[in-house]
């Protein structure tokens, strides 16, 4: 879309500033205090100032978010990442020329830097009485029509920078996200875990049931995959001799996009030697409680119309009990695919006739069990066919030592007592291969190198995976995963912004470009000849 009148007016102001010898994009700032620090400084000094301004000059800087022109006085708020502060420009303090310059050249969205003295206005607001002001960045785009918040959802996701600029609640979500990740690292680091990094590009994908993204590695002349999980590499590290390892990483799954799924997402995985799924269940509870206290300061979380209480201990329920309670199906008694398919369809599950038995179970769990689990609930002891990397229960080889954590109808975590028998693991891979041949695109391929690693020996190990994005959804009461990912995947828009052609006439405003353009337009000696 073409440049609008406001954008063209701002570009002309850039032209005028350049003509005055003023760089609208200087490289440096002399800020001495953030907005929050400036306000805090005056609040601390005020009792000792006797109603006078702070005699010590300070310099603040930030984006202009409001301007009120009162004739001989201008009130303007600027904002930085710490908060906002009001600038007070009075003709007799800054001089008539500086005040007129501000009114002519400063617009909303510009970045400015102001020197002055802190004081409190008659209305009670801590402000900066400006003595000098400089432009730090001339914004060409004005803010959205409603400065109080960008409301179009798709635009908020596509232009997250505008969303962050205009919606304080959005900024707070990502502050909370950072606090959650910091708390998770602190919990694990204090308990002797080693943070590691494993490959994002993998020759064989594994560690989860998912369809991968495929790419081609030209230097190696080989097809590679974006990882769907880092599990198999982390367990190789347990084989190698580390007892406690973790990674917070990006995973990629070539699947649909909905309120709970984004093809690129963030996972925490950790592995503990000489532990089983009961130990990991306890650690999971402790970790999430610790993160909630650190990031939120409370264990009571608003979630839609519910209030979730994270106070331990959390409910524990076997997979068999959960499925019986919410579907009436005993999967230990219904072991053939046709019968399970018929029962699932009678309940209204969305499964195709060729869906393999374990995928039908998984769909029943997602459709009927998960939405009912609002308060924190561990569902444990899964069928072996659903868990190709988990250890069988010694007293019932049809089941594995696995649990999932559900909160607010979200699946947050998945954990096992890890399978460390290389022959059993090889058999499970073969079972996956058979499911793949039957049409299950999410079944894992055989990873012979991982089998080889297990043949060197892996101690009893507990493993754990936590969806960081979904945990942040829960902690910030956001009902869609796109709200907690800074730049979520979106379908490309059919029409570009159209800036390439519209900005061409203004390239002469860039220092040095005018000479370059003149050289390009001039005929070369060869052409002249």
Image (spheres, rainbow, N blue to C red):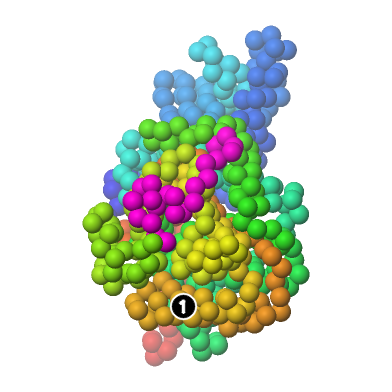
In the rendered image, the quadrant that contains the C terminus is bottom left
Q: Would residue 229 appear left or right of 259 to someone viewing this image?
A: right
Residue 20 visible in the shown view:
no
Residue neighbourhood size for the residue with mark 1, other residues' Cα within 10 Å, grouped as few (<14), some (14–19), many (≥20): some
Q: Is residue 97 above or below residue 336?
A: above
Q: Residue at x 45, y 32 (%)?
A: 307
Image position, residue 440 (x, y; %): 37, 74
Furthest-top residue in view? 50
Front position in the image: 207 or 323:
323
Q: Would residue 368 appear left or right of 427 to someone viewing this image?
A: left
The residue pinned by badge 1 equals 431
Q: Is residue 466 above or below residue 290?
A: below
Q: Residue at x 47, y 28 (%)?
A: 76
Residue 47: image quadrant is: top right
Q: Would residue 79 appear left or right of 449 to someone viewing this image?
A: left
Front position in the image: 307 or 261:
307
Q: Residue at x 71, y 24 (%)?
A: 56
Q: Could you say whether the residue bearing mark 1 is in a helix, strand or loop?
A: helix
Looking at the rendered structure, the number of numbered marks drawn on it comes to 1
Q: Is residue 113 above or below residue 49?
A: below
Image position, residue 513 (x, y; %): 47, 64
Q: Would residue 22 appear left or right of 212 to someone viewing this image?
A: right
Front position in the image: 454 or 485:
454
Residue 263: image quadrant is: bottom left
User: Which range is magenta?
Assistant: 310-332
Front position in the image: 443 or 250:
443
Q: Residue at x 45, y 76 (%)?
A: 432
Residue 510 part of the magenta-drawn span:
no
Residue 324 part of the magenta-drawn span:
yes
In the rendered image, the quadrant that contains the N terminus is bottom left
Residue 143 visible in the shown view:
yes
């Amino acid at each position: 879309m073409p440049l609008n009148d406001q954008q063209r007016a701002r570009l002309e102001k850039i032209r005028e500033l350049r003509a005055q010898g003023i760089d609208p994009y200087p490289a440096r700032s002399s800020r001495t205090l953030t907005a929050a620090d400036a306000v805090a400084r005056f609040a601390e000094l005020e009792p000792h100032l006797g109603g006078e301004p702070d005699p010590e000059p300070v310099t603040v800087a930030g984006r202009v978010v409001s301007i009120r022109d009162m004739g001989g006085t201008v009130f303007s708020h600027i904002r930085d990442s710490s908060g906002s502060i009001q600038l007070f420009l009075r003709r007799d303090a800054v001089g008539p020329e500086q005040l007129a310059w501000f009114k002519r050249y400063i617009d909303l969205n510009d970045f400015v830097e102001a020197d002055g003295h802190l004081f409190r206005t008659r209305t009670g607001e801590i402000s900066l009485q400006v003595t000098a002001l400089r432009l730090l960045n001339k914004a060409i785009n004005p803010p959205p029509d409603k400065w109080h918040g960008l409301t179009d959802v798709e635009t908020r996701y596509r232009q997250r920078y505008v969303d962050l600029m205009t919606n304080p609640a959005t900024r707070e979500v990502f502050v909370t996200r950072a606090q959650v990740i910091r708390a998770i690292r602190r919990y694990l680091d204090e308990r002797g875990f080693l943070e590691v990094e494993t490959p994002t590009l993998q020759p064989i994908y594994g560690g989860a049931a998912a369809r991968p993204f495929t790419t081609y590695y030209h230097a190696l002349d080989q097809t590679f995959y974006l990882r769907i999980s880092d599990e198999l590499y982390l367990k190789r590290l347990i084989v190698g001799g580390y007892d406690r390892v973790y990674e917070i990483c990006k995973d990629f799954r070539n699947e649909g996009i909905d309120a709970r799924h984004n093809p690129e997402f963030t996972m925490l995985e950790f592995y503990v030697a000489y532990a089983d799924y009961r130990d990991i269940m306890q650690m999971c509870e402790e970790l999430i409680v610790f993160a909630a206290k650190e990031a939120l300061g409370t264990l009571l979380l608003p979630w839609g119309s519910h209030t979730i209480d994270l106070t331990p201990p959390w409910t524990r329920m076997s997979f068999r009990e959960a499925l019986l309670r919410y579907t009436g199906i005993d999967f230990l008694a219904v072991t053939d695919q046709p019968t399970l398919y018929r029962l699932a369809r009678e309940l209204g599950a969305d499964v195709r006739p060729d869906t393999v038995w374990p995928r039908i179970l998984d769909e029943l769990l997602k459709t009927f069990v998960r939405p009912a689990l609002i308060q924190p609930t561990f569902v444990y002891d899964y069928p072996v066919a659903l868990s190709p990397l988990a250890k069988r229960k010694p007293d019932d080889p049809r089941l594995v030592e696995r649990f999932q954590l559900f909160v607010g109808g979200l699946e947050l975590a998945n954990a096992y007592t890890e399978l460390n028998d290389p022959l059993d693991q090889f058999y499970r891979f073969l079972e996956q291969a058979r499911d793949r041949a039957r049409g299950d695109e999410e079944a894992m391929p055989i990873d012979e190198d991982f089998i080889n690693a297990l043949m060197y020996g892996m101690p009893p190990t507990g493993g754990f995976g936590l969806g960081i994005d979904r945990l942040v959804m829960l902690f910030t009461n956001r009902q869609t995963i796109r709200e907690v990912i800074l730049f979520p995947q979106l379908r490309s828009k059919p029409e570009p912004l159209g800036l390439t052609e519209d900005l061409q006439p203004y390239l002469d405003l860039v220092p040095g470009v005018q000479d370059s353009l003149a050289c390009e337009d001039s005929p070369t000696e060869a052409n002249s000849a």
